[in-house]
Amino acid sequence: MEPFRIHILGCGSALPTMKHFASAQVVEIRGKFFMVDCGEGTQIQLRRSHVGFTKIQAIFISHLHGDHCLGIIGLISTFGMLGRTATLHIYAHEDLGPLLNDMLQMFCPHLDFSVEFHAINTTQQSVIFEDRSLTVETIPLQHRMPCCGFLFREKPTLRHIRRDMIDYYGIPNYQINNIKNGADWVTSDGETIANERLTSPADAPRSYAYCSDTRYISSLHSRLEGVNVLYHESTYDEASAERAKLYYHSTSTQAATVARDAHVGLLLLGHFSARYDNEQGILAEAKAVFPNSMLANEGLVVEV
């Protein structure tokens, strides 16, 4: 199968700590690299992750709190110094557009590449990026300002050729694409060989959902049904449930409830409050509701 990986660059919340960096991830899918959020320190974490700076083709920003977007202009400046020429696409709420334009004029007036801004509607679920192999959708969330998550979905692939059967029936190579697309084969003596004998089933499409920041949404699971991996903020434990409600964040139990109700494969917990010396209590609470939960951490790479 083609690579589909989540590189965790930062999984802390707004207050900087010595343990966690601000929110940032790289989604690697079929040889393409997309950044999700870009807090301070993202460049350092990119270096540590060994993800090439110039490989990133787009940045998706969930909302305009500083711990999710203040690293953008520095990263763009570095792209310029590294000789980037490919267009950089940035997807975010419309309010970032004029701010980004001002920062580019101030700090990066002579780039050799274009920065193309795409305003997104955070209140509806819609496809904002699509190519031949994947789509990216917005996931409406509820925070103290316009905010959305992102859902990365592979498109279905073609069936796999069974080379032993192709060789057995002497099928010429120029017919391979037809057979991948479902065609049968008719031998020289008129026998029809069903496609199912010449191929094996395609790999099931994979999906990854990123949900940060948000208060608990009882209906959110319906938008995430069956995703392979879900990253859901769990800023607080249950002892701080009232604080989570006040600041429009989620507890670990609430994140796990969403994962359970959505029947996801794996729950990644993140966006941890700086009040916790470690997050084992958060993990234990989540596992009590959804056993296949794990903590995000800087440097973690998750295979989807």
Image (spheres, rainbow, N blue to C red):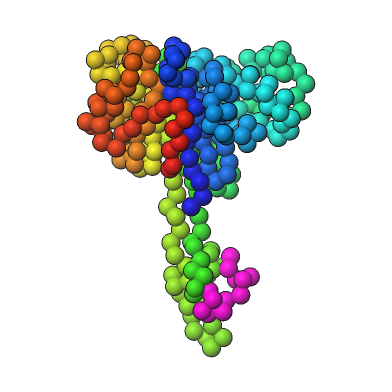
Identified at 58% across, 48% down, the residue is: 132
Q: Position of residue 45 (x, y in %)?
A: 53, 25
- Left or right of 170? Residue 78 is right
Q: Nearer the viewer, residue 289 or 181?
A: 289
Query: Residue 129, relative to residue 201: is it above or below?
Result: above
- Magenta: main secondary structure equals helix
Residue 77 part of the magenta-drawn span: no
Quarter of the figure with residue 17: top left
Where does the image place residue 295, in percent across and percent down from the top left?
35, 29
Q: Nearer the viewer, residue 67 or 262?
A: 67
Give above or below for 65 relative to 159: above
Residue 60 visible, this angle? no
Q: Please name the residue shown 48% across and 61% down the image.
A: 159
Where residue 190 appears, as percent x and y from the top left, is 52, 86
The magenta span reads 166-177
**Residue that extends furthest to the left in the rendered view of this protein:** 288
The answer to whether residue 44 is left or right of residue 269 is right
Is residue 55 among what the camera can see?
A: yes
Q: Is residue 169 magenta?
A: yes
The residue at 76%/28% (across/down) is 112
Residue 97 location in percent, x, y?
A: 62, 19
Residue at point 34%, 23% (across, down): 234
Judge left or right: residue 69 versus residue 267: right
